[in-house]
Every structure is written in structure tokens, then in C-alpha cells.
Amino acid sequence: MSETSTDPRHPNPRGDSDGDGESDVVITIRGLKNSFGDQVIHDGLDLDVRRGEILGVVGGSGTGKSVLMRSIIGLQTPDEGEIEVLGEDMIGRDELEAKNIRRRWGILFQNGALFSTLTVAENVEVPIREYFPYLKPPLLDEIASYKIAMSGLPADAGPKYPSELSGGMRKRAGLARALALDPELLFLDEPTAGLDPIGAAAFDELIENLQKRLELTVFLITHDLDTLWAICDRVAVLSDRKVVAVGTIEQLLALDHPWIQEYFNGPRGRAASAGLQKDHRGA
Amino acid sequence: MGDQAEAQDNGPDGNVYSCTGSLTITRAASTQREIDAVDDPLVIDLEGVDKMDTVGAWLVHRAVRDRKAQVRGASKVHQKLLEQVADADQPSRIRPEEGNAAIRAVNELGEAVTDAGRTLVGLLGFLGATVLAFAAIISHPKRFRLNAVVQRFDVVGVRALGIIGLMTFLIGIVIGQQGAVQLQQFGAEVYTINLIGRISVRELATLMTAIMVAGRSGSAFAAQIGTMKITEEVDAMKTIGVSPIEALVVPRLLASVVMMPLLSFYAMVMSLLGGGIFCWISLGIPPLTFIQRLQEVTPVTDLWVGLIKAPVFGFIIALAGCFQGMLVEGNSEEVGTRTTAAVVQSIFLVIVLDAVFAVFFSSVGWI
């Protein structure tokens, strides 16, 4: 990730602090507790996400990966704990202040969550219109068009409605909307779930390219071992209501945690690692 | 980040637009204005830009593309961003093509007509499928889903008692009150009882019940079945070998057909009760007199008229609701559209049929 050092937005990505007062860590979570009734999902969860990395979040079903994401983006108010995103405390903020931070992230929901009554291009325009209502329509339309192209959709996808798209295209359209405001931070909830292997690999590649080119920080929830091997810089493992380990896959493999061992060394884990270890940047 | 300053000077290369500070979406509108204000030949100087995003890059790219502008002073990062947006330059339409308004109007009219025709044919087909399902159940009584039917009885009938009772009770009072105001002018307020008795029993109780059942249950049928279509539950049923018509439509139809006469009778009683209480309190007609006079002026054929219509209305309501639910395809918006269509269709059909019944019953002499 040496290219980030030339980025004028973050002149000192590995340093202690830079001119904007923004540090190396974009998301800080301390002592997070979430529960639904008697069921405690997270208890004392700590996690740091560093600027410019793709952090994969894995965990068994029901370990609260999506709940963690929803807590960070403010859709779920935690019982306890602190969450800091881009240097701003997120809990208990009023709507107006939170809006300024929301502008700086993009979210791809699991099923795209595209507005079904709007075309793909109009979907991409929604966040831009919301924050920059004075932009002229021709410019707005051009912005939507290049965002659509950047997300790897063909030009004729613009005027289509979400119901007319395939699953893979819907995810790309959701990504185009997530990228609408040039976010610094991108949240992806199982981006490759439900895609065929070719489509999933293409989507992985797209995310990696965009991350490199736009210098994004990516928070990626996934079950897809291939995605983990192919594009994640670090992986956080959710288990027993907290993050039990964070590190590169090699570092995780060295740990003696039963779930991690089973996850990466199970039949599927081995197959994924055999296929993709070569391409992995850390390897 | 608001330290952007622009300068324009007429150098030998052209008119230079110097951009400094941040060239991002936040300043997109003003930057575009400023670029537009500079005459050709345009040179964009990015020397002083310290922060650029894809929108900023797009503005520069746009000027290069449309006005052959020259760019200078771009750093490596800026160059990379400019290349990226140039790669993604792919004109895309935002909305589907709309075309000529006149042609579109004709088109829409034609589509509406064919749609109406198709709906009618579809409804007939659906009616046929339902009759076949009934026949199949009669020949294989084991396939009859008693639990489902009883549950629908509860939802369509028992749970509607409160609202239908209250509604028709109030309608009884309104008929009495409005009638009394007019009839008092002739000193004939005692005829208010005729009015209440005949209108309630013959017309309004059944009609209002049908409208309430259409709004309450017809819409629910369409929404329930429509949602099941979207979540592919109906498809799952078919592949398992369960007929959706037998499992979903028949219990709802039966419930609606059986419950409508019962609810209508109950509505008649409540309406007469409301009217009777009004007469007692407002006109001073004691309950016993009210009942006696009611018996004299309301022929029993009025009751038959009201009760014969009820199951037919129930059938129409359930048929329209289930039919529209089965038509749902695609997205969740469709469920809403179809539910509305179900209610509108069933109320419309109920009122048309009511008129047909009125003519029919008068011509057979049940006046």
C-alpha cells in the first residue's frame, strides 16, 4: 500500500497524525455491547480499521457481523461502548452532525437495497441530490453515468429498473450508488453472496481495483473464502461475542483457535487457499 | 477546505483557469460555473490543487472532452484520477426513453384496453380454475383443508364483527335521523320505521358489509397471496405438488361466501337496533311499537333479497382479491398496486351486481 503515501488527501498514512487531525485508524470500536432481549450478540467487542485497507469480517452465522456493521453506520444503537468513525464519535450524535459523517461513507447492502421505483441511474443520483441539490441535471446525469461505468455496468443499465437486472448487476448498481459521493469508507455486506464464481471473482476484482484507484478503506463482511484470500489485507474473526483475532490470513492460521482453524483449514478453506494463495498480496 | 482561489490570465497558450485548494464534489457547481465563464482556448492549471475526487476529475475531463482544454500542473495522483474517469466515460441514459407525447397517449390507451381485455379473460380463466379446484375437492374430500377454512372464517367473519356492527349501527341512526327530518314536514315521522326497516334489510346492510369485507379481507387476500408470490412460496407449493388454488384460494373463497350472509344478517340487526334506538330517544316511539310496526311494513322477501345477494358479493370479493394476488410478479410495489386494484374492482363489481339484483328482484315481484 505504498501508493497511499502519494495521496494528497492522506499525506502521512502510516504516521502518527497528519494535518487534518485524522489518524491512521478510521474506525475505532471499544467495548461494544449489543443485545436483543436476553440474547447478547456482542460483549466487550474491540476493533480498529486502518486507513486504506480492506478488512474482511468473518464469523459463523449469528455472530453478529451484520449487527456490527449496523452499529457502526448508526442503524443500531448499541447498549454500551464507543464507536468512532473518521475521528468522530458516532454514538448519541444528533442527526445533523451524523449527516456530515454519513456523506463520507458508502454502503452496499446485502441485496443491493436499490429503490425499486427509480432507475439505476436515478438510484445513483439519490445521494448526490440529497447532499448537493444545486448541481445542474446535465452534470448530475454525467456523474451518474461514469459511476455506473466505474462499477462495471454497461451503458444500457442506466435507464433500467432494479427488477430488470440480474443479481450480479444489482450488486454493481448498489456499488455505484455506494460510490456516488466519493466515499472514503466503503461498507460491503456479503458482496459476493448469491453470485456465480465467475461473477464473484469479477466483483472481487472490481472492489480491489476501486479500492486501489480511489484509495478507499473497505469494511467487508463475507462468507466467501475466495474473497478473503484474494483481496483482504486483514481479516477480523468474530466469535464468542467479540473479535477474537485480527490479522493477515497467515497470522490467523498460526493461531490456535478452534473456530479459526476449522474455518481456514476445513475442506473449503483449503481449496480456496490452494487456488488463490499465489495471488494473495501477503504471500 | 474553502481556500480555493481562481485566476484567469490570457497567456500565450490560452485563457488559464487556475484551480487551487480542493476540487471536489462540494465545489462542483461553482467550479463548473467558473470553468464555463472562461473563454476558449481554455487551459486548466491544477498546480495548486491539493485534493481531488472523481467529480472534480470529471469536471476537468469534461472540459478536455468538450472544449479541447489543456491541462497542466497535474500531479501523478490527479493524472491517475483523470485517466480513470476518462476510462469510465460512457454516456448512459438516466431514464427509459419516453417518446412523443401524442403517440404515448395513444399507446397507453391501447395498452389499457388490451390490459382490461386480458384481465377479463384472466379472471374467467381463474374462475374456471377455481371451479375445477372445487370439483377436485368434492371428488377427493380428503384434500379439503378444514383448518385453513376455519382459520379464514375467524379472520373474515368473527374479527369483522366489531367494526361492521359499529358501522351499521351508526348507519341505522343516520337513516332514521335523515328520514325523520324529511317526514316530520308532513307529520309522518312514524314512516321513519318503514324507511329504516326496508332500506337496512333490503339494501344497505348487505352493501355496507360487502364494502367493509372488500376493504378488510379482499385487500388482505391480494396482499397475502401477492407477497407469497414474491417470496416464491407459491412456486414452492406448486413444485411440492400442492395446488395453490386449492390451498390458498378455495379456503378464502369459502370463508368469504359463508361469512358474508352471516355478517349481513348481523349488520341488518345492528342497523335496525341503531334505528330503533334513534326512534325511541328522538321520536318517542317505544321499542315494542317499533318492532310491531317493523313486522307490518317490512316483507320477509326483503330479508331474502338482502341474504341472497350476500354470498354472491362475498364470492366476487374473494375472487377479485385472490385473482389480483395471483397476478403479482416482480417487485414489492406490485403488491400495493394489485391490492388497490383488488379493492377497487371488487367494490365496483359489487355495486354493479347490486343494481342488477335490484332490477331482477323488482321484476320477479319482490317489491
Image: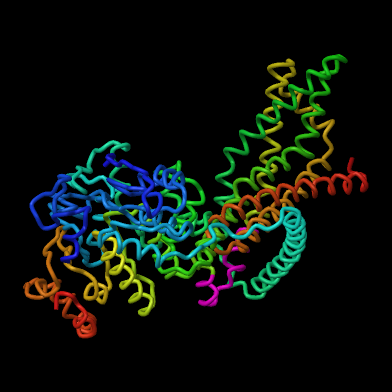
On-image quarter of the N terminus of chain A: bottom left
Pick the residue in front: B216 or B38.
Answer: B38
Residue B298's x, y, as percent?
82, 34
Magenta stretch encompasses residue B156: no
Say above or below: B291 vs B164: above
Instruction: Determine the main secondary structure of the stretch shown in magenta.
Output: helix
Q: Residue at x 28, y 36 (%)?
A: A94
User: Is B121 displayed left or right of A210 in the figure?
Assistant: right
Q: Residue at x 45, y 50 (%)?
A: A126
Number of marks in the rendered image: 0
Residue A65 visible in this rendered orientation of the protein: no
Q: Residue B49 at what x, y percent from top left?
A: 27, 50
Q: Position of residue B267 (x, y in %)?
A: 68, 38
Query: Can residue B226 be seen?
Result: yes
Rendered position, B109 above or below B287: below
Specify how the rendered protein is coloured.
rainbow
Q: Is residue A5 left or right of B209 when viewed as pictured?
A: left
- Front-lying residue, A33 or A232: A232
> Residue B253: within the magenta?
yes
Q: Residues in magenta?
A: B235-254
Q: Is residue A177 above or below residue A278?
A: above
Residue A213 horizontal side relative to residue A131, left or right: left
Q: Quadrant of the C terminus of chain A?
A: bottom left
Q: Nearer the viewer, residue A120 or B342?
A: A120
What residue occupies the far front of the structure in this picture? B12
Can you tell which quarter of the image residue A223 is in?
A: bottom left
Asked if residue B73 lies left or right of residue A233, the reply is right
Measured as percent of width and height from the top left, residue A151 is found at 39, 65
Residue ID at (58%, 43%): B160
